[in-house]
Image (tube, rainbow, N blue to C red):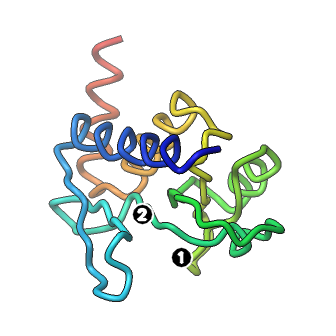
Amino acid sequence: MSAKKEQSLREAVAAYIADSYGVEPDFPWVRYPDYAVFRHGSNRKWFALVMRIPKSKLGLPDETPADVLNLKLESDLAVEFLTKEPGFFPGYHISRGCWVSVLLDGTVPQERIFPLIDRSFSLTAVKGKKRAKKNREHFSG
């Protein structure tokens, strides 16, 4: 997949997060100026991280750099299940369990990625906000 396709998917992810949650990327590392962290405004917890790394860091036999999105899932089991699909890998750069890395090279379509961003956002939200959203969904259905 071309670098242009990768960049457009990276941009689509950032635009989706900005439109859905009003969150702009934070670039906290001087050494890695293109690593974009997306955080909750209320608790500053990360819910997404976009970085450009060699594909070999994901266990692929290729040194070509690729954009990767890290997201939080419900459990290690969810990560294990998802990583059986092409384009999904155990979380890179985040050492705790429950994180998955998604290759942003077109292997995984954005329609598959966006619901995972929503899930990660919800899982890392302040507890009261999770309940409030759940209550709204319960009464709106």
Q: Point out residue 99 in the picture as x, y percentages from the top left corner.
A: 58, 63
Most extreme residue toward the top is 141
Residue on which the image places disc 1: 94
Query: Marks 1 and 2: which is nearer the front?
Result: 2
Which residue is more in the foreground, 108 or 41?
108
Expressed as whole percent of the image width and height from the top left, the position of residue 10 reads 42, 48
The residue shown at (77%, 45%) is: 86
Taking depth in this image into account, of 11 and 70 the one nearest to the observer is 11
* Residue 116 image position (x, y, % from top left): 51, 42
Q: CA distance from mark 1 to mark 2?
A: 9 Å
Q: Which image quarter is the N terminus in?
A: top right
Classify mark 2: helix, strand or loop. Answer: strand
Residue drawn where x is 60% and y is 59% of the image:
101
Q: Amino acid at mark 2?
A: Leu
Whether residue 116 sits left or right of residue 107 in the image: it is: left
Q: Is residue 90 above or below residue 105?
A: below
- Which label belongs to residue 49? 2
Nearer to us in this view, 91 or 130: 91
- Judge by depth and name the residue closer to the eye, 83 or 35: 35
For badge 1, the amino acid type reads: Ile
Mark 1 / mark 2, whichever is N-terminal? 2
